[in-house]
């Protein structure tokens, strides 16, 4: 009986040891499996976190690019409007310049026409005045020529009439004849009369 009891106790001890070993192995296996699954889960979480970070970065870059594109489109629209406004201003300035050049050409033609008319009138007036003066001078010269010619004839006749001269008259008559012949304002007329 004691042997059986010792055998049972020993069996129970061995069974307890095997059970303890089994549970230890089971716990170790379960712990390894849990650690492996936990590692996989953590790797998956890390991978998803990295993916989320990449997605977040891509979304940020996309939002930044969208904002830049929106700003660029806004600037482009502003530049287009400014170019359109400048084109309208250029067209208006071209119209004004064309009108100014046309008016300037008309004014120049008008001024040139007026200047030509004024010059023609001045030339005609000057020609008329010069012709009138020439006629007056010619009339006066003709009158003087006629008077000098008549005086020359009368003086010559008078000098011939009183020959022979009294004593002392020869010097006076010679001086008068010399003056008549040599005077610059008379000589040409006297020469013409002599001819």
Image (cartoon, rainbow, N blue to C red):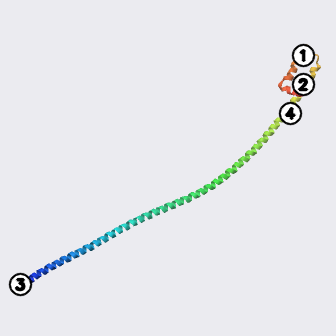
The residue indicated by pointer 1 is 170
Mark 1 secondary-structure assignment: helix
The extreme left residue here reads 2
Q: Is residue 64 above or below residue 187?
A: below
The extreme bottom residue here reads 1
Q: Tell me the mark number nearer the camera, choosing from 2 and 3.
A: 3
Residue 152 — which label? Answer: 2
Where is residue 35, by image quadrant?
A: bottom left
Q: What is the crowding at mark 1: few (fewer than 14 residues within 10 Å), some, or many (at least 20)?
A: few
Q: Residue at x 74, y 45 (%)?
A: 116
Q: Tell me the mark number nearer the camera, choosing from 2 and 4.
A: 2
Sequence-wise, the earlier of marks 2 and 4 is: 4
Q: Is residue 106 above or below residue 139?
A: below
Mark 3 secondary-structure assignment: helix
Sequence-wise, the earlier of marks 2 and 1 is: 2
Side of 32 relative to 146 (left or right): left
Q: Tell me the mark number nearer the camera, choosing from 4 and 1.
A: 1
Q: Nearer the viewer, residue 56 or 15?
A: 15
Mark 2 secondary-structure assignment: helix
The image position of residue 108, as x and y in percent, is: 69, 48
Q: What's the CA distance linking mark 2 and mark 1?
A: 18 Å
Q: Tell me the mark number nearer the camera, choosing from 1 and 3.
A: 3
Side of 126 relative to 153 (left or right): left
Sequence-wise, the earlier of marks 4 and 3 is: 3
Q: Tell me the mark number nearer the camera, choosing from 4 and 3.
A: 3
């Amino acid at each position: 009986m004691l042997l059986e009891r010792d055998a049972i106790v020993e069996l129970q001890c061995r069974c307890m040891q095997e059970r303890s070993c089994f549970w230890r192995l089971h716990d170790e296996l379960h712990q390894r499996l849990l650690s492996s699954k936990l590692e996989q889960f953590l790797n998956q979480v890390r991978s998803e976190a990295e993916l989320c970070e990449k997605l977040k970065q891509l979304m940020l870059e996309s939002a930044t690019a969208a904002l830049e594109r929106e700003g660029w489109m806004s600037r482009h629209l502003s530049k287009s409007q400014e170019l359109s406004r400048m084109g309208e201003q250029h067209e208006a300035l071209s119209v004004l310049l064309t009108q100014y050049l046309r008016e300037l050409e008309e004014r120049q033609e008008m001024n040139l026409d007026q200047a030509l008319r004024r010059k023609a009138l001045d030339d005609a007036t000057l020609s008329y005045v010069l012709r009138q003066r020439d006629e007056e001078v010619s009339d006066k010269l003709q009158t003087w020529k006629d008077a000098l010619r008549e005086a020359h004839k009368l003086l010559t006749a008078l000098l011939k009439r009183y020959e022979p001269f009294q004593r002392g008259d020869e010097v006076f008559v010679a001086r008068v004849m010399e003056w008549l012949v040599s005077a610059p304002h008379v000589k040409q007329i006297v020469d013409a009369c002599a001819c």
